[in-house]
Amino acid sequence: EIELTQSPGTLSLSPGESATLSCRATQSLSTTYLAWYQQKPGQAPRLLIYGASSRATGIPDRFRGSGSGTDFTLTISRLEPEDFAVYYCQLYGHSLSPTFGGGTKVEIK
Amino acid sequence: QVQLVQSGAEVKKPGSSVKVSCKASGGPITTYIITWVRQAPGQGLEYMGRINPVIGTTSYAQKFGGRVTITADDSTSTVYMNLNSLRSEDTALYYCARDCSSPDCHPLGPPGWFDPWGQGTLVTVSS
């Protein structure tokens, strides 16, 4: 079973800075079946990115997903106050049981 | 635009069962693949299973060992998640979400990403 490891666990940044979040798979993914979600306290997760790099409807272009194989990255440029949240990556695909990473918390420094 | 609305919070005794509902607005739920994910307090997200009402199939995460059953009711556009033999570790927020593997969320696709999500249902298991 493929597992996803997210790092760092917590990222302390100031508004206006950029955030780089990592999601690493224990096996190489033959296709870019990776999604990213944002979750704020008391809210359900919200889809940000699917297919490793495609932004979901309504997601600002300061959110960018990239990567392939075993290493995937979510980059948030110019952090806005509403971007401070927990971010999860998720693996999906034909024979794969959907799996989530453990999450990265982006907090205000 | 699809919205998923879930039933209210539940408090259950260990050993009992809980049934959480997920109703769609903006289209018949039976044209969507619906997935259930749970989140224990302060923890991450955990996939439970999914239903494809179009072709009448379900699949479940191995971890739940047959304790979870997902069903759909066409007449009310509602999907249900039933979890039995509850234990304290099942205390969590339970979410339903539409499962998409293409931008148009075609219901005959493979397992995909989840969008949108219901608001969550808190299930507390306590004696």
Image: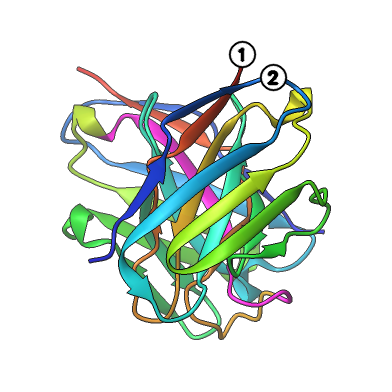
In front: A85, or A26? Answer: A26
* Residue under the point 78% across and 27% down: A16
Q: Are marks 1 and 2 on the same chain?
A: yes
In front: A77, or A96? Answer: A77
Q: Which residues are magenta?
A: B90-104
Tell me the quarter of the picture where residue B6 sits. Answer: top right
Classify 10 Å Cα crowding around label 1: few (below 14), some (14-19), many (20 and above).
Answer: few
Q: Which mark is residue A109?
A: 1
Please say whether residue B92 is one of the residues in the magenta stretch. yes
Residue topped by disc 2: A14
- Identify which amino acid the numbered label 2 is placed on: Ser
Callout 2: helix, strand or loop?
loop
- Identify which amino acid the numbered label 1 is placed on: Lys
Please say whether residue A87 is one of the residues in the magenta stretch. no
Tell me the quarter of the picture where residue A38 sits. Answer: top right
| Left or right: where B90 falls relative to B72 | left
Residue A31 image point, x, y percent: 48, 80
For disc 2, the chain is A
Mark 1 → mark 2, Cα distance in angstroms? 5 Å
Placement of the N terminus of chain A among the 4 image quadrants = bottom left
* Residue under the point 37% across and 61% down: B49
Task: Kindly give the residue lying farthest to the front in the view shown.
Answer: A17
